[in-house]
Structure formats: structure tokens, C-alpha cells
């Protein structure tokens, strides 16, 4: 355990995680470190060195009971007052993070149920920063120094690990991320200090996205707009049995594009859904599946829906209005 100067047990402070700004990979990149961006939930893990741990979410909520499998990390760190920053994920059989499976773990506050889920769908803590070691504040040290301290600390176990970073060579790291189907890259300036609760330009996140063409089969009304103006479109992709529902897309659509779609929808409306599977939205309006749109998304969910879809444009070259 880590005593203070008064002899009392050191109490780890509550720390809001430092955040990255979205943007392209930095160029030149020799002064930057590159990490894999994991698709999970941010977590600050702290221990006073007495064998127990406390898990805190990005919003500052205590989520310790939700992930009992991480209690064993407290035993590994017994005698050391430590605060770690990382990402909670659930890994699939290929070692990729699966956010859909992680969602089944989130928000569980019943200890017995959390223990069952820990066996069926275990979480893994990807540790990428250390903020205190033996009770000593490392916030004012550089990223490079903190990673060296984390390497010496060396936490590694069944449910936690410390993925390496790469100095420079951002393009090569990005190529690996794309090839392996990972979420993206986080670039961190080697000299960056840890500034809790801030979104710093010294940390930059670049997400991998997929671009695809989808068929519009319906829409939902834009809140507060005149009747007939879409707030989102319901899209699908071709499947063996017909048009398969792939999700609702509203983000990224301009007022001009909404006006253009309003005119189209007034002509190609229909009474029934063109999708072969159920559509889980409230108040849908259906249209003939003739319009094709280009969207981007981070991945497909296990339910076959687009994750974080963003509208790019209508594809008039692929649209059939005859």
C-alpha cells in the first residue's frame, strides 16, 4: 500500500480523461506516436495499492461493479498506488473489438448479473497511459515518459494488456489498421502532457470509414419542419431475399438535399415497406426503392445495421426514376 506523509493510505484522485480531436494523420510525423483506436468505452482505473480497483467512465460514473473481471488487476498492482487510462473493449475471435457485444455489458449494476456476463462476454482493458505511479503525479510529464513508466509497470493479464505504440510511420500504421479492419488510429505528440478533461490538439484521432451505395426505401419526418421534409432516410442493400434494411441515415444531409428528397418522395411514395425485414423506427414513410445514395459508416453491427452512418450524396447516375 502507498502511505502519504501522514501515514494514511493514498487516495487516488478522480481524473477526467484527456480527449483527442478528430483530424487527418499528422505530417510530418516523426514527433508523434501512433496507437490503434479501439472501439470501446473509455475508462480510468485507479487503485490505492490495497488490492481493490475503482473504474470510472468518461462521464465520471463509477462502473466498478459492471466489470468484475478487472478486480484481479488490483491484486497484480497490490502495494502500488496507480491510475491508468485506457479503453474497455470486448474482443472477437480475431482479436478485434466488437462494440455490439460490449453493449451487452454496459449499464449493468447488478453484481450477480455482471459476474455471469463476465464469463459469457469478458471485457478487456486496453491500457495506453499511466497518470500516477506509487502515488506520484505523472500528469506533468511527457507522453514518452509516461509510456516508459507504463512499460516498467508492465500490467498484463487475461483481461488487460498494454498495446505498443509506433513512433512515426503513421501511413504504415494506417495501412495496417485498414487491412485488419480496425476502427482507426490515435496520434499523440511525444512531448504532450496529460491535461485532464480537455480535448487537445496534441492528440488526434483518425477513424477508418467505409463508403458504400445504399437504396432508399423510406424516410422519417424532420422534427419541427413542414410535413414531408425528411430528417433521415431509411436505407437498405440488396440481399438474396430482396432489399435488406441497413439503418437510418440523417447525419450530414444539407437543407438543399432535404428539399430535393422531399420533391422526389412526393412522387415515389408507396403504402408498404419495400424491405424484406422489419424496420425498427417510429413513424416511417415508404417510397419505391429507386433512389441510390452514397453513405459512409464505420462498420456493420452484428444486427446487420450500419454503425455511425453519414450521408454523402445522392447518386443520380445510379438512380432510377422511370
Image (cartoon, rainbow, N blue to C red):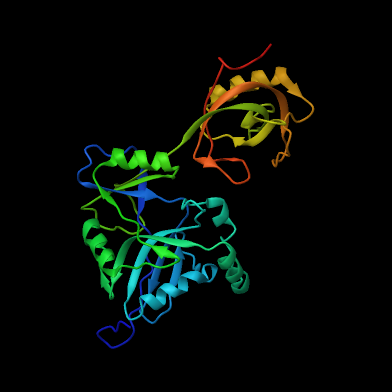
Residue at 45% of width from left, 42% of height from top? Answer: 181
Asked whether the viewer can see residue 88, the reply is yes
Residue at 50% of width from left, 62% of height from top? Answer: 123
Q: Quadrant of the N terminus?
A: bottom left
Q: Nearer the viewer, residue 309 or 19?
A: 309
Asked if 56 appears above or below 277 in the picture, the reply is: below
Q: Nearer the viewer, residue 298 or 8?
A: 298
Q: As drawn, is 117 to the left or to the right of 60?
A: right
Q: As drawn, is 272 to the left or to the right of 69?
A: right
Residue 236: quarter of image: top right
Residue 122 is situated, as x and y percent measured from the top left of the image, at 53, 63
Residue 10: quarter of image: bottom left
User: Residue at the bottom extreme?
Assistant: 7
Asked if 234 appears above or below 116 in the picture, the reply is: above
Q: Quadrant of the C terminus?
A: top right
User: Residue at the right extreme?
Assistant: 271
Residue at 27% of width from left, 39% of height from top? Answer: 26
Q: Nearer the viewer, residue 276 or 55?
A: 276
Q: As drawn, is 8 to the left or to the right of 306?
A: left
Residue 59 is situated, as x and y percent measured from the top left of the image, at 47, 59
Asked if 322 appears above or below 268 in the picture, the reply is: above
Q: As drawn, is 210 to the left or to the right of 169?
A: right
Residue 167 is situated, as x and y percent measured from the top left of the image, at 24, 48
Asked if 87 appears above or below 282 in the picture, the reply is: below
Residue 108 is situated, as x and y percent measured from the top left of the image, at 59, 65
Asked whether the viewer can see residue 16, the reply is no
Residue at 39% of width from left, 68% of height from top? Answer: 14
Amino acid at each position: 500500500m502507498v502511505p502519504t506523509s501522514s501515514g494514511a493510505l493514498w487516495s487516488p484522485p478522480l481524473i477526467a480523461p484527456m480527449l483527442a480531436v478528430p483530424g487527418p494523420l499528422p505530417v510530418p510525423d516523426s514527433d508523434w506516436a501512433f496507437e490503434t483506436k479501439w472501439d470501446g468505452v473509455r475508462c480510468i482505473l485507479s487503485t490505492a495499492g490495497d488490492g481493490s480497483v475503482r473504474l470510472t467512465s468518461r462521464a465520471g460514473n463509477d462502473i466498478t461493479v459492471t466489470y468484475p473481471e478487472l478486480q484481479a488487476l488490483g491484486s497484480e498492482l497490490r502495494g502500488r498506488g496507480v491510475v491508468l487510462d485506457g479503453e474497455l473493449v470486448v474482443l472477437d475471435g480475431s482479436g478485434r473489438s466488437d462494440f455490439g457485444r460490449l453493449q451487452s455489458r454496459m449499464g449493468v449494476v447488478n453484481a450477480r448479473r455482471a459476474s455471469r456476463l463476465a464469463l459469457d462476454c469478458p471485457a478487456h482493458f486496453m491500457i495506453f497511459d499511466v497518470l500516477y505511479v506509487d502515488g506520484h503525479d505523472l500528469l506533468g510529464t511527457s507522453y514518452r515518459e509516461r509510456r516508459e513508466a507504463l512499460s516498467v509497470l508492465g500490467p498484463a493479464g487475461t483481461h488487460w494488456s498494454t498495446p505498443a505504440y509506433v513512433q512515426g510511420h503513421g501511413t504504415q500504421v494506417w495501412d495496417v489498421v485498414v487491412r485488419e479492419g480496425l476502427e482507426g488510429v490515435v496520434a499523440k505528440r511525444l512531448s504532450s502532457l496529460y491535461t485532464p478533461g480537455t480535448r487537445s490538439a496534441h492528440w488526434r484521432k483518425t477513424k477508418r470509414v467505409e463508403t458504400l451505395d445504399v437504396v432508399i426505401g423510406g424516410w422519417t419526418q424532420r422534427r419541427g419542419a413542414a410535413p414531408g421534409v425528411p430528417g433521415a432516410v431509411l436505407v437498405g442493400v440488396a440481399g438474396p431475399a430482396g432489399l435488406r434494411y441497413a439503418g437510418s441515415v440523417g447525419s450530414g444531409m444539407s437543407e438543399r438535399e432535404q428539399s430535393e428528397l422531399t420533391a422526389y418522395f412526393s412522387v415515389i411514395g408507396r403504402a408498404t415497406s419495400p424491405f424484406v425485414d422489419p424496420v425498427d423506427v417510429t413513424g416511417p414513410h415508404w417510397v419505391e426503392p429507386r433512389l441510390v445514395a452514397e453513405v459512409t459508416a464505420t462498420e456493420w453491427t452484428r444486427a446487420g445495421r450500419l454503425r455511425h452512418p453519414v450521408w454523402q450524396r445522392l447518386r443520380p447516375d445510379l438512380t432510377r426514376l422511370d
